[in-house]
């Protein structure tokens, strides 16, 4: 599959600080791609470079085969960009925002009207089209923003921390919209500092201190960290951990009212069955957990994710 | 997949951005007050207060007209800063719209608002006899001068506002630069001041716009004013230069 975005050895400095220190990767056409990183990891800098908001100083970026540095206008025509703070004019009505945006992308006449109507319909905004944007809730504003950005039919939709300020239901709705856009062939790239959000992506890149720390599907990254983790709830963690170590030869960590066992090698279910049959009288509760993206981050960077 | 054109046709973008300025203006009543009522009030107060000094309604009319254009231009271009802070501008900057279209849309939109307010005030001047138009040629020339001054001042405001991140900064510039520029344009003091003040007045491009209006409106004393062809040349050059400067700043990063 061809690459929607190719990023090659991109570096960026702000006066004293080196925000990006040579980042290279590709985003495939038609995937949902997350750029995960804590604050200061360089993901927002990369977003600003990709969106053409900031000039590229070093390295190269291609979007849809067009080189960003040589031909920013062509790249802009391929992109839909959703900023963290909505780029809506709050003094304008919902449909007025869409009309204005469409004209900036060269739409006009019947095509423009049709696209505006389609966008409103698709995002359930038809009955709100004459509302002033400033009177809408954050979730609704986000919907207008998405309708607006998808109206010129971009090949790539770029989003910066899209779920900032959204409640859980609006967040779920946002991700449904992104999945729907992807189903139509739009490549979706979103920056995020939320681990649970990155898990929804097809693939994700983890940025840390301006470098690429990991790049793969969430499942592959998680399984590469190690096997499942089993947590046993018990009254006597120390004694149980010691017994597991002595009888099964496994590294068991006593915690507060629980014991954690890493299932290196065997699957979590097999190990759980063995533990439960051997120590059933000492176990109040048993749970199997998969490594989280936080575990991935810790394993790849040696630092906590925050 | 269709190959996208490098740029969207700029006319649509220019008109959309200019239209947006007008819509926003009419939805913010306080801007009408700031841009029109305040200068009219000043005109009444100056004219009444300085009547004894042979400076009356006619003398202050062209200057007040330019003040209306100036204030409206300021209010229109301050919105560049708001657009930047509220995020709207980001969306425009990443659109496949050439930068000159962004600058032109803003300046033409702002200038159109200024013209609307200016024409209302002109009507007031004609009705009260403070200004006179002796024929259709004068009417066209007065409107042309107003349009050139409006474009020049909106362009100047755009250039100042483009790199600013706070409206407070703009207010400071307004107090120390834009208002003195107006005061020293022949709008307030009579032409012919001696010494350095006269030099500043002569060097101020706005002087020639005020003078052009004074000539054509037969408002106030025209003795000592720069010759009319010079007024037109400088005013047109001022508008072209400010339009070019807006294009140039918008084309630079940020």
Image (cartoon, coloured by chain):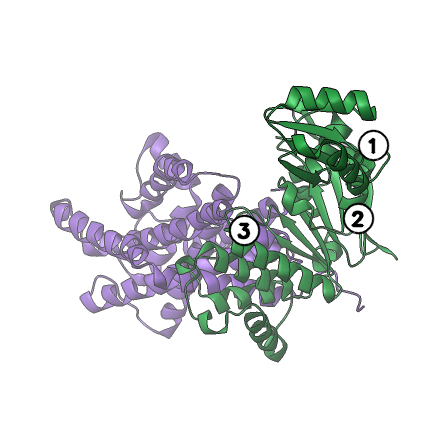
On what subunit does the disc labeled 3 rest?
B
At 42% from the left edge and 56% from the top edge, which residue is drawn? B150
Write down the quadrant of residue A21 in the picture: top right
Placement of A144 over or under A267, stated as above or below: below
Q: Do pointers 3 and 1 mark residues of a single chain?
A: no
**Circle 1 residues within 10 Å: few <14, some 14–19, many ≥20:** some
At 29% from the left edge and 55% from the top edge, which residue is drawn? B30
At 62% from the left edge and 62% from the top edge, which residue is drawn? A177
Q: Do pointers 3 and 2 mark residues of a single chain?
A: no
Return the residue at label 1.
A264
On what subunit does the disc labeled 2 rest?
A
Element on which disc 3 rests: helix
Q: CA distance from mark 1 to mark 2?
A: 50 Å
| Residue A151 drawn at (x, y percent) | 63, 66
If the image is split into quadrants, where does the C terminus of chain B sit? Answer: top right
Element on which disc 2 rests: loop
At 56% from the left edge and 75% from the top edge, which residue is drawn? A117
| Residue A132 drawn at (x, y percent) | 41, 63
Placement of A176 over or under B250, stated as above or below: below
Observer-nearest of B107 and A159: A159
| Residue B142 drawn at (x, y percent) | 38, 64
Observer-nearest of B241 and A300: A300
Name the colour assigned to chain B in the rendering.
purple
């Amino acid at each position: 599959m061809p690459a929607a975005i190719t990023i090659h050895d991109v570096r960026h400095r702000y006066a004293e600080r080196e925000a990006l220190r040579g980042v290279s990767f590709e985003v495939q056409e038609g995937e949902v791609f997350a750029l995960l990183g804590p604050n200061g990891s360089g993901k927002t800098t990369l977003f600003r470079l990709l969106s053409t908001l900031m000039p590229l100083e070093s390295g190269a970026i291609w979007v849809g085969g067009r080189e960003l540095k040589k031909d920013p206008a062509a790249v802009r025509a391929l992109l839909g960009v959703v900023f963290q703070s909505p780029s809506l004019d709050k003094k304008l009505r919902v449909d007025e925002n869409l009309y204005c945006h469409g004209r900036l992308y060269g739409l006009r006449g019947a095509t423009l009207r049709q696209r505006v109507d389609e966008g409103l319909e698709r995002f359930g905004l038809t009955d709100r089209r004459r509302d002033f944007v400033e009177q809408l809730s954050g979730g609704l504003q986000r919907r207008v923003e998405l309708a607006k950005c998808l109206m010129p039919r971009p090949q790539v939709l770029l989003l910066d921390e899209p779920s900032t300020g959204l409640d859980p239901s609006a967040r779920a709705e946002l991700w449904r919209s992104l999945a729907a856009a992807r189903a139509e062939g739009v490549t979706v790239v979103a920056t995020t500092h939320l681990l649970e959000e990155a898990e929804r992506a097809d693939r994700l890149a983890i940025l840390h201190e301006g470098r690429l720390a990991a790049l793969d599907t969430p499942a592959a990254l998680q399984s590469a960290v190690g096997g499942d983790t089993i947590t046993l709830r018990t009254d006597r963690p120390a004694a149980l951990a010691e017994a597991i170590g002595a009888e099964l030869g496994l590294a068991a960590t006593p915690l507060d009212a629980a014991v954690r066992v890493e299932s290196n090698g065997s699957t979590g279910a097999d190990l759980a069955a063995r533990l439960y049959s051997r120590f059933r009288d000492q176990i109040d509760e048993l749970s199997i957990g998969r490594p989280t993206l936080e575990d991935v981050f810790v394993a790849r960077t040696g630092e906590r994710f925050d | 997949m269709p190959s996208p054109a490098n740029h969207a046709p700029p006319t649509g973008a220019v008109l959309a951005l200019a239209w947006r300025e007008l819509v926003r203006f009419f939805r913010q009543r306080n801007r009408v007050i700031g841009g029109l009522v305040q200068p009219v009030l000043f005109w009444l107060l100056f004219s009444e207060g300085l009547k004894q000094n042979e400076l009356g309604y006619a003398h202050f009319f062209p200057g007040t007209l330019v003040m209306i254009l100036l204030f409206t231009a300021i209010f229109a271009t301050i919105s560049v800063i708001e657009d930047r802070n509220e995020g709207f501008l980001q969306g425009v900057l990443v659109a496949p719209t050439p930068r000159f279209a962004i600058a032109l849309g803003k300046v033409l939109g702002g200038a159109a608002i200024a013209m609307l307010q200016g024409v209302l005030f002109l009507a007031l001047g004609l009705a009260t006899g403070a200004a006179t138009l002796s024929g259709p040629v004068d009417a066209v020339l007065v409107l042309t001068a107003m349009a050139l001054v409006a474009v020049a001042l909106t362009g100047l405001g755009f250039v100042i506002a483009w790199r600013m991140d706070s409206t407070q900064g703009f207010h400071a510039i307004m107090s120390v630069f834009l208002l003195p520029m107006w005061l020293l344009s022949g709008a307030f003091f009579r032409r012919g001041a001696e010494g350095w003040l006269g030099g500043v007045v002569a060097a101020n491009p706005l002087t020639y716009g005020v003078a052009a209006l004074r000539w054509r409106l037969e408002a106030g004393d025209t003795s000592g004013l720069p010759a009319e062809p010079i007024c037109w040349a400088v005013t047109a050059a001022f508008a072209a230069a400010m339009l070019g400067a807006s294009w140039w700043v918008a084309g630079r990063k940020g």
